[in-house]
Image: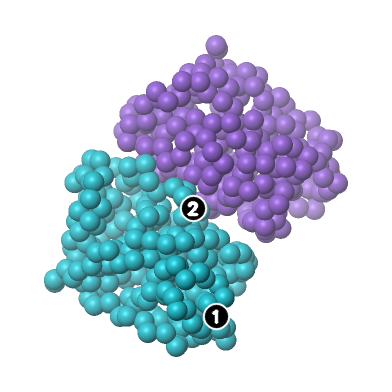
Chain colours: A cyan, B purple
């Protein structure tokens, strides 16, 4: 399996603290040795840092932990390969353009029969079930909505239904973002929490690091963090249910529901 | 204007030496302060490092200079903004998927009337003439070849014709790669050289750095470097003509010609 990490915030926020915790699971406190990646959105643009080598040994991961890139939407993933070789083209997150926006996707789980998913004009480059599922989702999105719907909820409710179909093929926990919205779908394991004033201290589970968000934030900040497993030991993480989807918009949950099996 | 740097090699080769020279032009020995980017291919996958801040001050550029990522196809760009604001979404290189391959593009120049270029399903995300020209090229490629032609020369000869049409709209120097082929089109300024045994020493023009390729290579290595302006002072760089295109395949020039005005 793999681990996911996402962020949605109303002010550009760096993820160094949470990323530091996640990276320890890339071969040190966790078995996810088969690559890692992280995508930061800045305006309509995004940049991805990825490496097929274990995050706990990666010099690029070290830079990302130390270099605070501030973003309102971040998606990260560390990989334990199941489908697809350990290679850069199989390293999450995956990014494709649709409707003049960059869409970024990361998946935790494993799908059966994914080879038959019709991806239309979105051809997978690598061999993972994850990238094929992403291409299938994009193809569904474009087929249903040749231009993006005026109400984002209409789009993401449809995406949730399609995620339910993927969940029925195996295990499908995912993060999807266009830089403004961050959508989650939970099949087995996904947790989240929202930090807002009054801010307190948080301590990482995987590394002896504590942060006082009071010092790092303003009273108006709203920062939601999503992770496969809780990253801190003294905060109240909410566990998502199987089939639950959530849509975060600049830190606030604006749409939520459960897709029945 | 901007500066381009490309590499095509028959063995995975790092570009730290040439990149170090180029980065000095990003605000130090050159005026290109408006961002920089570099894309490395590894197998079918690629990874891009980019920053909207001047390369000579960029911590990420520092990492790329020190961290030898070995690749057979590399495209890099430093930007002096003309069309489009200084922003991440306007920072080259641009990468899109077509036919299950990632295509990466960087442009030096300026086009008039680019707003009317029909990009079909490839929607630009940013505001540059460069990204729109790239989307237009991809749309032409896909329209002419719903599946990639068996003979790559057939594809790239067509791309050269389309590059000629873009050149007629202004200044269009470009690098285009799918990770296997590196194509160049020269409108005003583009130079190249191929390093092969017997290897010698090279000295950067922009920084007091010398490298002895003899120590870094094997006798079978063939490494072609493409740059807007020569990067070294003691090597014989070939200047490309206006309208000249070249196709490099693992370091060797396999197709070349001139598109008349």
Which residue carries the number 2 mark?
A42
Image coords of residue A25 (percent x, y): 49, 78
**Residue nearest the viewer, comparing A231 with A150:** A150
Kind of element beneath mark 1:
strand
Circle 2 packing at 10 Å, graded few (<14), some (14-19), many (20+), is: many
Identify the residue shown where x is 49% and y is 60%.
A12
Q: Is residue A247 left or right of residue B135?
A: left
Say which mark, if any, is on residue B257.
Answer: none
- Residue placed farthest to the front in the image? A219
Whether B221 is drawn above or below A64: the answer is: above
Give the quadrant of the C terminus of chain A.
bottom left
Give the Cα distance between marks 2 and 1.
Answer: 25 Å
Q: Residue furthest top?
A: B261
Query: Is residue A75 visible in this depiction of the protein?
Result: no
Residue located 54% across and 44% down the image: B87
**From the viewer's perspective, is residue A132 above or below residue A195?**
above
Q: Position of residue B151 (x, y in %)?
A: 43, 31
Please state the chain letter of the residue tagged with numbered disc 2 in the rendered image: A
The quarter of the picture where residue A59 lies is: bottom right
**Disc 1: which residue:** A212
Residue A207 seen in the figure: yes
Q: B220 and B184: which one is in front? A: B184
Please report whichever mark, 2 or 1, sits nearer to the chain's N-terminal start: 2
Q: Nearer the viewer, mark 2 or mark 1?
A: 1
Q: Does label 1 lie on the same chain as label 2? A: yes
Name the quarter where the N terminus of chain A is drawn. bottom left
Q: Residue at x 57, y 41 (%)?
A: B86
- Residue A145 falls in which quadrant of the image? top left
Residue B131 horizontal/vertical position (percent) = 47, 35
| Residue drawn at point x = 42 percent, y = 85 percent | A235
Crowd tier of the residue under label 1, counting other residues whose Cα lies within 10 Å: few below 14, some 14–19, many 20 or above: few
């Amino acid at each position: 399996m793999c681990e996911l990490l996402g962020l949605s915030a109303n002010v550009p926020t760096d993820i160094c603290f949470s990323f530091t915790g996640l990276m320890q699971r890339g071969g040190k406190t966790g078995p996810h040795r088969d690559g890692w990646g992280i995508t930061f959105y800045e305006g309509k643009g995004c940049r991805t840092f990825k490496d097929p080598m274990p995050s706990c040994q990666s010099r690029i991961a070290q830079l990302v932990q130390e270099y605070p890139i501030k973003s309102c939407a971040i998606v990260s993933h560390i990989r334990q390969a199941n489908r697809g070789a350990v290679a850069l083209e199989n390293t999450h997150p995956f990014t494709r353009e649709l409707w003049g926006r960059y869409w970024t996707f990361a998946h935790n789980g494993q799908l059966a029969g994914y080879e038959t998913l019709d991806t239309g004009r979105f051809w997978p480059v690598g061999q993972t079930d994850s990238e094929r599922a992403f291409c299938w989702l994009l193809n569904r999105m474009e087929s249903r909505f040749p231009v993006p719907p005026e109400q984002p909820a209409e789009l993401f409710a449809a995406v949730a239904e399609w995620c339910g179909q993927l969940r029925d093929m195996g295990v499908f926990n995912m993060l999807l973002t266009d830089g403004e919205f961050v959508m989650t779908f939970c099949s087995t394991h996904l947790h989240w929490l929202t930090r807002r004033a009054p801010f307190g201290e948080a301590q990482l589970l995987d590394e002896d690091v504590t942060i006082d968000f009071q010092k790092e934030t303003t009273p108006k900040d709203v920062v939601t963090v999503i992770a496969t497993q809780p990253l801190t030991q003294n905060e109240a993480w909410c566990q998502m249910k199987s089939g639950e989807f959530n849509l975060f918009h600049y830190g606030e949950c604006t749409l939520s529901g459960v897709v029945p099996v």
